[in-house]
Image (cartoon, rainbow, N blue to C red):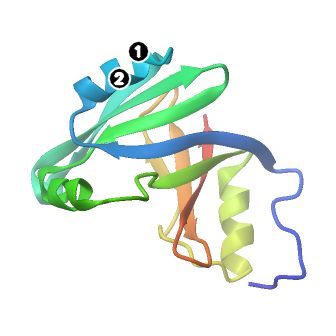
Amino acid sequence: MKPSKTFLQGNFKGLQHLGLPVSNLQASLEFYKSLGFKRIMSSHVDIPTENDSILVAMMEQKGVIIELYQVTKNEMLELKSRKDGHVDHIAFDVADVEKAFKELSEAGFTIIEEKPVFLNFWENGCKYFAIRGLDGEKLEFNQII
């Protein structure tokens, strides 16, 4: 990574969502509804290696989107033992996820995925990848297709 250069010029569109792992999606949906959030998308991601699924819901209020996702059984203990730091990732909206991936990979950022990942979210899906920040934080770059 070359700190003197600015990346993602013309490709960065703003904050997309905050990702929050939860132990009970239904209870979390009700909690965030009580705060005025509305569900704008629901899905699930199958995890074949764990014979499990992650349940996902996007909640929105006044342009703030929170991704609630119920973790797998294997991740539940770790989630329940957290004291602080429940925000799992910050997702930024990009115009072209492939271009962002190439630019940040070539610049030497610590990329978590081998390539942008497609998820069957939203109407036509989305693609994302994440990098690690200097203190291990996960920064996601996401394009809704």
Q: Say which of 76 and 132 sits in front.
A: 76
Disc 2 residue type (three-letter) = Phe
Q: Say which of 138 and 35 sits in front.
A: 35
Name the element at disc 1. Answer: helix
Q: Residue 27 is drawn in which quadrant?
A: top left
Query: Disc 1 versus disc 2: distance between alpha carbons?
Result: 5 Å
Which residue is located at x 69 percent, y 42 percent? 15
- Residue 89 point in image, percent of width and height: 50, 54
Which residue is located at x 21 percent, y 54 percent? 80
Name the element at disc 2. Answer: helix
Q: Is residue 107 left or right of residue 105?
A: right
Q: Is residue 17 left or right of residue 93?
A: left
- Residue 64 point in image, percent of width and height: 62, 29
Q: Which residue position holds label 2?
A: 31
Q: Vertical placement of 44 versus 109: above or below?
A: above
Neighbourhood count class around disc 1 (C-alpha, 10 Å): few under 14, some 14–19, many 20 upward: few
- Residue 125 point in image, percent of width and height: 50, 34
Q: Is residue 112 left or right of residue 62?
A: left
Which residue is located at x 60 percent, y 34 percent? 145
Which residue extends farthest front? 83
- Residue 99 point in image, percent of width and height: 73, 59
Mark linked to residue 77: none
The answer to whether marks 1 and 2 mark residues whose Cβ atoms lie closer than 8 Å is yes
Disc 1 residue type (three-letter) = Ser
Which residue is located at x 24 percent, y 47 percent? 71
Q: Which residue position holds label 1?
A: 34
